[in-house]
């Protein structure tokens, strides 16, 4: 998944506004961020809140336009509506690549690898 990082005031303020769609393998990571709105958006999104350690603290699926949501979080990942479930994202899953991404405008994230690592670490 290719994730664009919004770290600065204007990129965080604009977010996904003005885009016609979001691809199945795309996302926007807004940081720092503990709340978002979907005012002026044209389509629903899934919202994944992430703490400073990279743990998913809350997932809001199919957040429709003109809504607001918040959580105890350091960052927020906005992805295509329905993708949180399709990707198997769950509260408690750790995505450390998103906690402190390297400098730059984008990050590549292999969610399947993160899920496999979690399964291995929780196996008896």
Image (cartoon, helix red, strand yellow):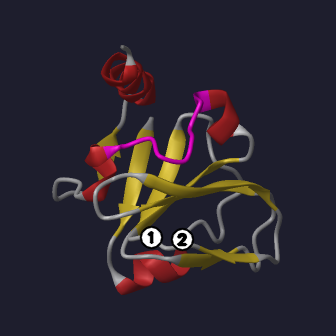
- Disc 1 vs disc 2: which is toward the camera? 1
Which image quarter holds the C terminus?
top left
Q: Position of residue 16 (x, y in %)?
A: 59, 65
Vertical order, 96 against 117 (above or below): below
In contact (CB < 8 Å): disc 1 and disc 2: no
- The mark found on residue 73 in the picture is 1
Q: Secondary structure at mark 1?
A: loop
Judge from the rendering whether residue 3 lies leftward or rightward of residue 8; answer left or right.
right
Q: CA distance from mark 1 to mark 2?
A: 17 Å
Which image quarter holds the N terminus?
top left
Q: Residue at x 80, y 58 (%)?
A: 43
The residue wearing badge 2 is 15
Q: Residue at x 63, y 40 (%)?
A: 84
Q: Secondary structure at mark 2?
A: loop
**Is residue 92 rendered magenta in the image?**
yes
Judge from the rendering whether residue 37 lies leftward or rightward of residue 72; answer left or right.
right
Q: Position of residue 4 (x, y in %)?
A: 40, 54
Judge from the rendering whether residue 92 lies leftward or rightward of residue 16; answer left or right.
left
Earlier-in-chain disc, 1 versus 2: 2
- The mark found on residue 3 in the picture is none
Q: Residues within 10 Å of mark 1 (few under 14, many from 20)?
A: many
Closer to us: 22 or 58: 58
Vertical order, 73 against 49 (above or below): below
Q: Quadrant of residue 33?
A: bottom left
Q: Quadrant of residue 85?
A: top right
**Is residue 106 rendered magenta in the image?**
no
Q: Residues within 10 Å of mark 2 (few under 14, many from 20)?
A: many
What residue span does the magenta drawing correspond to? 87-95
Q: Most prominent secondary structure in the magenta stretch?
A: loop
Q: Residue at x 54, y 34 (%)?
A: 25
């Amino acid at each position: 998944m290719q994730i664009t990082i919004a770290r600065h005031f204007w990129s965080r303020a604009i977010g996904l506004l003005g885009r016609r769609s979001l691809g199945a393998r795309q996302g926007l990571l807004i940081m720092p961020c503990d709340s978002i709105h979907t005012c002026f958006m044209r389509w629903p999104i899934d919202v994944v809140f992430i703490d400073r350690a990279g743990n998913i603290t809350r997932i809001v699926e199919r957040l429709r336009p003109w809504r607001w949501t918040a959580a105890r979080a350091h960052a927020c990942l906005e992805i295509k509506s329905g993708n949180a479930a399709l990707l198997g994202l769950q509260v408690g899953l750790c995505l450390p690549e998103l906690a402190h991404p390297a400098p730059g405008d984008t990050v590549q994230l292999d969610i399947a690898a993160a899920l496999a690592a979690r399964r291995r670490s929780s196996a008896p």
